[in-house]
Structure formats: structure tokens, C-alpha cells
Image (cartoon, rainbow, N blue to C red):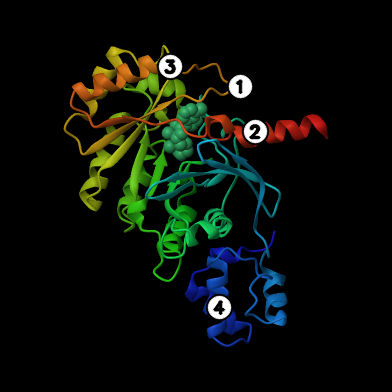
Amino acid sequence: MKKIIQDLSLLEMEELTLALGEKKFRAKQLYEGIMQGKTIDGITSLSKAFKERLKEEYENEPIKIKETFYSADGTEKFLFEFADGNLVEGVLMKYKYGYTQCVSTQVGCRMGCKFCASTLNGLIRNLTAGEILSQILIVNALHKKDIKDGAGKDGRAVTNVVLMGSGEPLDNYAETVKFLKLLTAEDGIRISARNVSLSTCGIVPKMYQLADEGFPVNLTVSLHATDDVTRAKVMPVAKAYKIQEILKACDHYFKKTGRRYYFEYTLIAGENCDEEHAQGLIELLKGKPCHVNLIRLNEVKERELKSTDDKSAYRFLGMLEKGGLSATLRRQIGVDIGGACGQLRASYIEKKEKYE
Ligand code: SAH
């Protein structure tokens, strides 16, 4: 596989451009074109010779949209294909304040969470920073018209980013941090770290490291249980890092960044959403600068875990609120276009295997 030009900062593109014997201002044209989601070939301001030279080393089109699914509520779900044929999925959610895109950081995942479809076949490979960024660049380009119609700002449709697609961002730490640098760069698409949420299954040492990187993103931890034994049943990573260690790392994150942190709590019927679990959560989190996002389980057909009904979900939310926690039950969006993390890719691959 060739290199990914989206991995480069403006400064690095300047070095590359000069090394290839072109004038420095060509780098700016290249960078702007790339930030607009163009392929190398698609940047009309550059000479054919320069583009051919670039394409010897760099992928012309490192990402393609293989399929798009449209939900009745406006949500769009994408199946992206990288240059080596690997697939990941992404979601675009449209809100009044802008568009939020959910991006993937790895092809597959090695964390093994029992409810998650992304991890069914383990980790295939890490994505590079540029491959993570290119998911946003291509969607921005696709929605250029919406920008003209008033969506987004500063020439981009996507205003918010969540790292909640396939993969564990802190298991691909270096590329994820580099991605944050490219995403927030002054001269790039300039999405503020405050508008970025990074979701982790709780890799404690990397949470400390992230606190010191200088990107005050919204740190979100997937909790899903109130004690370590129950948590380890659905999340193998819980054997390595205890809930108390996670809470300490979150407090450190708050001290360093001033940002409150978030917990994801997926409601699994008969497992984690009875009164005792609500009390457990309240004991763990009361008085902390955090917010709890309750998620309804998206049932994965390869897994046995079951979702809760609406009534139980709201009852659980009510108990948390009564106990003094800040909590919300996440609105279900895009359910008609095929569910949870990794399901789209899994069903695509299955379909392909069946018909080929
Ligand atoms: N690896 C990261 C980010 C990816 S998953 C993490 O663990 O946080 C993003 C969120 O979706 C996590 O909270 C994850 O636990 C949750 N999730 C995964 N599969 C799900 C499913 N089938 N139903 C509901 N939530 C799911």
C-alpha cells in the first residue's frame, strides 16, 4: 500500500513539495485541496507532472464510500473502503447545531466486548491518522451543498466528531493523537477539541497520557457495569484495569483539562439495569464532574445479550437522576439503517461471502 497524504500536516506537505522541486506555495494548494476532500488528481491548481510524482508515493484516493444508508430521521451511515480493500463504517448525525460524525480508528478491534460487533473477528489493522481524518474529509465534501444552505461553519459540514466507530482509539494511541492534531490544526478543518468525544473501554495508562497531550477532548469511558466482576464478564479489558483505577484516571483528566468526563452505560436486560445497579452507579459517581449516557443495547445477532424495553430504560434513568447523577438516555437514531458498531461491516462481509 502506498503512503497516505492525509497523514501530513501543512508543514510536512511544504517539505515534500520543496523536495519534489516545486515552489512552496504549491504545498498550500495541495493542502487546501486535500482538506476539501479532493483526490490528488482532483486538485486542478496543481500541474499534472507534480500530481503524477505525488501519486508514485501516495494513494490518489485513500478512501471511498462503498455504500450509503439513509435513515428516515436524516442519519446517514457509510461503509468506507480503504485502498487495501478494508472496510469500516461511519455515521453522520444531523442536529440543529451542526453535524456530528462518528469515525472509526481501527479495522476490527481486539478488545473483545461481548455486545460489540466490531470485535467479532479481532483486530485487522490500525488506521493511520490520515485514514481517520479522510473519513471526515470525504463526508464534508459530500455535504458541500449543505454548507451553502447554512449547515456547519467555516466551510465544513461536520462540526463535531465522536471516536465511537469501530476500534479502540487508545489501542491505536499514536495515530489517534496525530489525528487530533490534524483535526484541530489552525490551518486545517479546525474542529475544536471541545467538539470531539473520544470513547475508550478504559485503558488506564493511555488515559493519563491523553490528559497531558494538550487536546482537551471530551473523554468518555464505556463502563457498562458497576463492579469489576460483572464488567469483566462483558468487557475482557476489565481484567486488566479496575473501575477504581479508571475513576482515578478520570479525575486526573479533569484536573489537567478542566473538562468533565462521560460514561457510556449500555443497558443489557437482566444484567446491569436493576435497582441495585442504579445504586451501584450512584455510589461510584455521585459528586463527580461527570455525565452518564445510557445507551439501549443494539442487539447483535451473533451475541446473546438482550436489550431493555423503554419502560425499564426510563425507570433506570429516573433512579440515577433521583440519586443525584447527571444522566441522559441516548435517543435512538438511525435504527432503521442497521444498528450498532461493526454490524454494517459484518453484514456486508457476510453478504459478500454468501454471494461470491
Ligand atoms: N472502543 C471504544 C469506542 C467504540 S464503541 C469504547 O469501547 O468506548 C462506542 C460505544 O458503543 C461504546 O460505549 C460501546 O460499548 C458501545 N457499543 C458497542 N456495541 C454496542 C451495541 N451492540 N449496543 C450498544 N452499544 C454498543
> In the rendered image, which residue does mark 4 sit on?
29
The residue that disc 3 covers is 308
**What amino acid is found at the position of numbered circle 1 in the picture?**
Glu
Q: Amino acid at mark 3?
A: Thr
Q: Is residue 260 visible?
A: yes
Q: In the rendered image, is residue 272 in sight?
A: no
Q: Residue at x 36, y 58 (%)?
A: 192
Image mark for residue 338: none
In this rendering, would 320 be left or right of 126? left
**What kind of element bears circle 1?**
loop
Is residue 317 or residue 169 the one in the foreground?
317
Q: Please, is residue 260 above or below residue 30 in the view?
A: above
Of callouts 4 and 2, the N-terminal one: 4
Q: Secondary structure at mark 3?
A: loop
Q: Of the residues shown, which amino acid type is indicated by label 4?
A: Gln
- Residue for badge 1: 302
Please give the residue where the numbered disc 2 appears in the rendered image: 346
Residue at 40%, 18% (x, y): give it. Answer: 310
